[in-house]
């Protein structure tokens, strides 16, 4: 199950710039609970492990997008400080909240992002250019923090944020792929320092399962370049709709997870 999901997640990472966590987290949560991990901690481990898998995936996907000139390096430089700080803070906070809270955050954010990307709002602009300075770093910190709590690479939030401020969808996807690396590195570090008060599966450090990581990471890195090539062959509107579809499916799954945990 993990191999099949990871191969698909890699394609999705390259195609949509979302790091693959959008499908990995629900599957990891299910696999962990079926193998005996308590529901209270399975979501935490799923989020943390998913974030760790984004590191090799983001590197592979970013290289493919960079080769096509699809990364906005000016935005990367402007948003990096806020993104890095937000990702670290988000992981430290996530390790201390209930599993239902993580699932609810995941579901609500994914649903809102899906709505924006699905509706015919390609021409909607809240600003003429991507914000820089304090405003830009505030946006980046929010994206980094929420993405770290969701175990995703940031594309779920940064793609809509960039398209709403004048960015083209293909360049937004490429830039989001690189943002995945900026989120995954400090976020994973935060999860590695967690000290859960329960017995966790073998080869789990902090909240990161290295057993699952060893299965997932090679598969996602293998298929991410294919997704990047596919992204540049699809029309802009179809790419937005594909993004919205996957977000909507995951949103429903995670909101149901949060409701069941209440």
Image: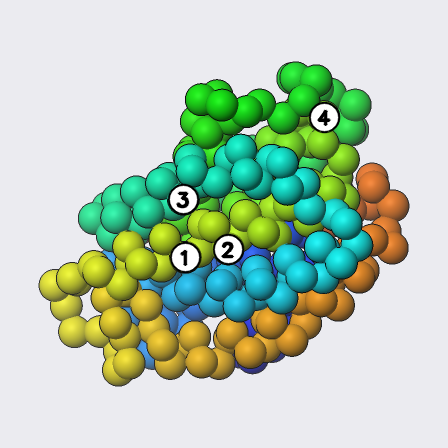
Image position, residue 76 (x, y; %): 57, 40
Image position, residue 116 (x, y; %): 65, 31
- Circle 4 sits on which residue? 166
CA gap, disc 2 and disc 4: 23 Å
Image position, residue 29 (x, y; %): 40, 64
- In the picture, measured across the screen, residue 96 lies left or right of residue 87, that is left
Check residue 181 in the rendering and tell me which mark sits there, or answer none.
Answer: 2
- In the picture, measured across the screen, residue 115 lies left or right of residue 77, that is right
Other-residue count near label 1 (Cα within 10 Å), few / some / many at <14 / 14–19 / ≥20: some
Q: Earlier in the sequence, mark 3 or mark 2?
A: 3
- Circle 1 sits on which residue? 185
Can residue 68 be seen here? The reply is yes
Q: Is residue 198 above or below residue 218?
A: above
Q: Nearer the viewer, mark 3 or mark 4?
A: 3
CA gap, disc 3 and disc 4: 23 Å
At x 53%, y 68%, the residue is 56
Q: Quadrant of the C terminus?
A: top left
- In the picture, measured across the screen, residue 132 lies left or right of residue 92, that is right
Confirm or deny contact between disc 2 and disc 4 (CB under 8 A): no
Q: Secondary structure at mark 4?
A: loop
């Amino acid at each position: 199950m993990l191999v099949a999901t990871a191969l698909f997640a890699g394609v999705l990472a390259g195609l949509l710039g979302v790091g693959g966590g959008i499908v990995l987290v629900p599957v990891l949560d299910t696999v962990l609970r079926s193998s005996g991990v308590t529901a209270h901690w399975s979501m935490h481990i799923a989020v943390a492990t998913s974030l760790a898998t984004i590191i090799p995936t983001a590197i592979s996907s970013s290289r493919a997008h960079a080769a096509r000139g699809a990364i906005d390096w000016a935005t990367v430089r402007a948003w990096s400080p806020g993104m890095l700080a937000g990702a670290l803070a988000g992981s430290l906070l996530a390790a201390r909240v209930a599993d239902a809270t993580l699932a609810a955050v995941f579901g609500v954010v994914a649903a809102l992002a899906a709505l924006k990307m699905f509706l015919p709002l390609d021409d909607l602009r809240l600003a003429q250019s991507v914000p820089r300075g304090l405003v830009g770093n505030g946006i980046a910190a929010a994206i980094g923090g929420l993405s770290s709590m969701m175990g995703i690479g940031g594309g779920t939030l940064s793609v809509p944020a960039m398209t709403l401020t004048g960015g083209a969808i293909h360049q937004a996807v490429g830039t989001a792929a690189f943002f995945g690396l900026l989120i995954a590195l400090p976020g994973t570090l935060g999860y590695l320092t967690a000290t859960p008060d329960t017995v966790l599966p073998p080869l789990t450090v902090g909240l990161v399962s290295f057993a699952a990581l060893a299965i997932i990471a090679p598969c996602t890195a293998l298929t991410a370049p294919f997704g990047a090539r596919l992204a540049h062959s699809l029309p802009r509107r179809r790419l937005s709709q594909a993004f919205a579809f996957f977000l909507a499916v995951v949103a429903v799954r995670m909101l149901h997870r949060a409701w069941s945990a209440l």
